[in-house]
Image (tube, rainbow, N blue to C red):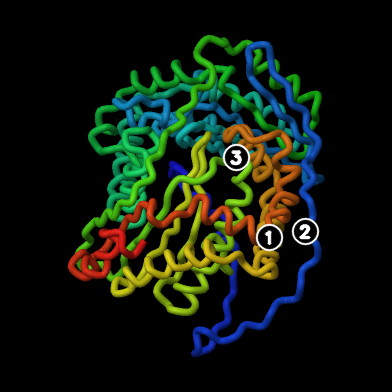
Amino acid sequence: MMTRRVLMTSWLAAAMVVCAGTNAQAQKQAPPEGGPPKAFTVPAQVTYALPNGLKVTLIPYGNIPKVTVDVTIVAGSADEGKDHEGVADLTAELMKEGTEKLTASQLADEAARMGSTLDVSSSYDRTDAGLDVLSEFGPNAVRLLADVVTHPRLPESELERLKNDKLRQIAIGASQPQTVALIHFRKILYGDHPYSVIQPSESDVKKIAIQDVKGYVDGNFNPKRTHIYVAGKFDLPAVKKAVVDSFGAWSATGPARTTHVPTPNPQRVLDVTDRPGAPQSTIMIGLPVATADSPDSIPMQVTNALLGGSFNSRITANIREQKGYTYSPFGAISSRYHDSYWVEQADVTTKFTGASLKEIVAEINRLAGEPPAAAELKGIQNYLSGLFILRNSNRGALISQLQNVDALGLADDYLKTYVAKVNAVTPEGVQKMTTRYLKPSSMTIVVVGDKSKITEELAPFESGKAL
């Protein structure tokens, strides 16, 4: 079962090789200057809707004889209702257990025959069912996914097993300081809103019955909330016919997309969870920022990358490379529909917990007080531009970007203009974003660590003197 994606950190997975001598602050050889950033060309696409409201986007793309088909339903854990937390994830898992016509093994065999495995996952606002198949099976993949989405078997016989799997995941999460910190951070930020729930409680999962699963599906799965994306090399007329044949008769009854826009509460709060004997403290510091559809969103992304959201960022250079407080600090902007927050997270050596927070705040204040040098900013812009191109270099990634545009309510030209807008940000613009949004005096700080060793050094942050 896929964990809810709560932080946009895929960039951290890029392979990095760092050569260091005994002196942590040794001068690095400057890399050769890169060429001008290339604009991203969005592949031509065909987008339309069926009479029942179902949306379709077809993107002929590339020469590799493969095609990715993804069915996105705008319904997820935010639609569960307070008394049924956990039902969305369980529904996604049960959808892999067969259809009205196919058993679980037959469904798996059919996906394998096309060169794929069925993937179904759920997040706060979406449920996705997807296949990546050989081109010749594009129409068959559409039909199979239609069967999974519109006629799921949802066998009660498998529910207890899947609930036990979920309970094990909850227990593991409760033992991980990063998960505990995120639970506390989100709860402070969102209160009782569904976005505050990182994982359901054990009692919520235990009481879920098959009627709850079927009620969730009946109340949320319908063509008006569904969008099919097809990208790769495929027979366009054949796929269009498969979409009509397999989804055209799906009843349009049920509500259209619902939105769950929160009102996050920026608070100067220090929240400390005791983890006796912990050799490290997990720290999170952040607050709400410009939403993804705001004109400030891209400048804010550039600011984050320069401040803490890239390997060459200031916070990373400070508390990782220069001082050795942590190995993997990172900053991120986490976004949902009309909702975003910025957060810096790090696992730091216990005795440097307070010092790490002090340096993070100092780097924020330094950027607020003086714009970055043009050369420093240009390196970050080149990094973001190149990363954006890489993120759109395959079928699944392209679909993911289009889904993101739709889910966050972004402009139709967002992908086309992204690189240009990144490179249009000025040093003064970065400083402006910092002073406008990144106010340490309004930040929530969450720490999971050994209270007996960190309470004294955290006192200035509790009183606000260090902010």
Q: Amino acid at mark 1?
A: Gln
Residue on which disc 1 sits: 381
Point out which mark residue 37 bears: 2
Q: Amino acid at mark 3?
A: Ser
- Residue 97 visible in this rendered orientation of the protein: no
Residue at (71, 29) in percent of width and height: 57
Point out which mark residue 372 bears: none
Classify 103 as above or below 319: above
| Callout 3: SS | loop
Q: Earlier in the sequence, mark 1 or mark 2?
A: 2
Residue 264 in picture, x, y percent from top left: 40, 39
- Asked whether 331 or 135 is in front, the reply is 331
In the image, 384: left or right of 234? left
Q: Earlier in the sequence, mark 3 or mark 1?
A: 3
Residue occupying the far left of the picture: 452
Residue occupying the far front of the picture: 369
Mark 1–mark 2 CB contact (< 8 Å)? yes
* Badge 3 density bin: few <14, some 14–19, many ≥20, Cα 10 Å: few
Residue on which disc 3 sits: 294
